[in-house]
Amino acid sequence: MRLSRYFLPLLKETPAEAQIVSHRLMLRAGMLRQEAAGIYAWLPLGHRVLSKVEQIVREEMDRAGAVELLMPTLQLADLWRESGRYDDYGAEMLRVTDRHERELLYGPTNEEMITEIFRAYVRSYKALPKNLYHIQWKFRDEQRPRFGVMRGREFLMKDAYSFDVDEAAGKAAYNRMFVAYLRLFKRMGLSAIPMKAETGPIGGDLSHEFIVLAQTGESQVFLDRRMLDLPVPGEDVDYDGDLESIVADWTRLYAATEDVHDSARYDRETPESERITARGIEVGQTFFFGDKYSKPMKAVVSGADGVERPVQMGSYGVGVSRLLGAIIEASHDEAGIIWPDPVAPFGVGIVNLRPGDAATDQACAEAYAALTKAGKEPLLDDTDERPGGKFAAMDLIGLPWQLIIGPRGLAEGKVELKRRATGERHTVPLAEALSMVGA
Ligand SMILES: Nc1ncnc2c1ncn2[C@@H]1O[C@H](COP(=O)(O)OP(=O)(O)OP(=O)(O)O)[C@@H](O)[C@H]1O
Ligand SMILES: [Mg+2]
């Protein structure tokens, strides 16, 4: 992409309404525009990162055996009356009426709808296990939308739903999602710690919130420091095998949010030197709730014994749009964002220090072609802005590499390559710089 043709409305001033660094940087870097409280337009740079985050989530869901579909944003109120949640949900639910006076709602989550789809087609245990997911916009009329994408009213969520014949199979499905979550957050450069979470009236202890530690997080958390050193399963993890030992390793040590914190247990189980009290951002939650929806909604399957029983279900959410905020909270400096490579909107920023200078333009074009061919998605700054402004913009938008090309360097056969994360600089011939970034 050439910057002169792109749409990157950077802000010079720090927007007064943004209270936390990720919100400030997303606005300043031209990623986001607020259209109403908690409702945002995703500008091109923000949209590129959102798509990358979404794609990582998708790949890890698919790897774990989940199947993607897409459900609508609007749902019938009657469906929610079947589970009893229509009245319970309260003011967070955006309710609308169509021209035929039918009551609809903008979905805050999809348990009811997926249960309706499942019961329409599946009757036998032979079709199980199944895990269906989508990545779709949700609406929750939050009382206090704030912190940009962290607590929006409209936000992008990945929600997966598992269906199993009995509790043991349901637990195995839960474990697959648990492991997939460890992997997908890690792939984005995040350390997300599963913490015991409230399960509500259904009981059992099968719910975890995945929490990224950050000073600006909304939850207070208590954990054993050794959680931070646990190994995340590789992409060769066998989702058809028994994942219990991995889940056991990740749930043995103490980690809990304030809602379920048990200070006596914490003190007993965690040596004082290993205790961490911190703030955290909830980036995902996994939940096994058995027949909570399948029973009232009559989603039953016949077992091997021919007896029909409500299907055992779990649901698994990831806050896809919130993740951008969490990534920035975890990875930035005074100059701007530092994108981890896998989610960077562009892989390399090429800075042309003297547009119009034939040799410089030529070297930039060469670099651009080579990087494009290698799939590095370069962004070429070919504008007339002064060098200082170009450097500041590149630092702000946080691309992993900056390739700086100008007449003075070229006269000596050199360009400059800068790694955004470390500030490390290499003055080398263009071919060498290209090979250092993998082109
Ligand atoms: N208002 C929101 N804005 C952005 N992301 C959200 C919002 N609400 C929930 N999410 C994301 O969706 C995921 C799954 O939704 P879930 O129903 O578990 O949310 P929640 O527990 O109500 O979230 P919270 O406690 O933060 O309100 C959450 O883990 C979070 O990452
Ligand atoms: Mg939650």
Image (spheres, rainbow, N blue to C red):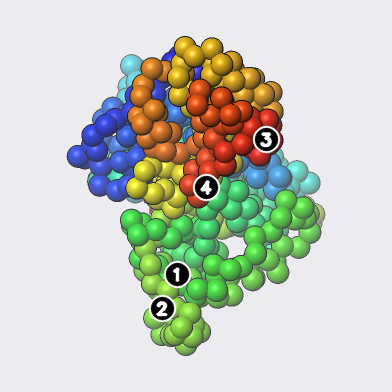
Q: How far across and how far down the image is residue 131, in percent?
A: 65, 45
Residue positioned 67% across, 24% down in the render: 370
Q: In terms of secondary structure, where does tag 1 sit? A: strand
State the residue in front, 334 or 311.
334
Q: In terms of secondary structure, where does tag 3 sit? A: helix
**Which residue in the structure is indicated by mark 2?**
262
State the residue in front, 189 or 95.
189
Cα–Cα gap, marks 2 and 1: 8 Å
Cα–Cα gap, marks 1 and 3: 48 Å
State the residue in front, 400 or 260.
400
Q: Which mark is residue 256?
A: 1
For the residues carrying marks 2 and 4, which lies nearer the camera in this image?
4
* Residue 382 located left or right of residue 40: right
- Crowdedness of circle 4 by 10 Å Cα count: few (<14), some, many (20+)? few
**Which residue in the structure is indicated by mark 4?**
424
For the residues carrying marks 4 and 1, which lies nearer the camera in this image?
4
Earlier sequence position, callout 4 versus callout 1: 1
Earlier sequence position, callout 2 versus callout 3: 2
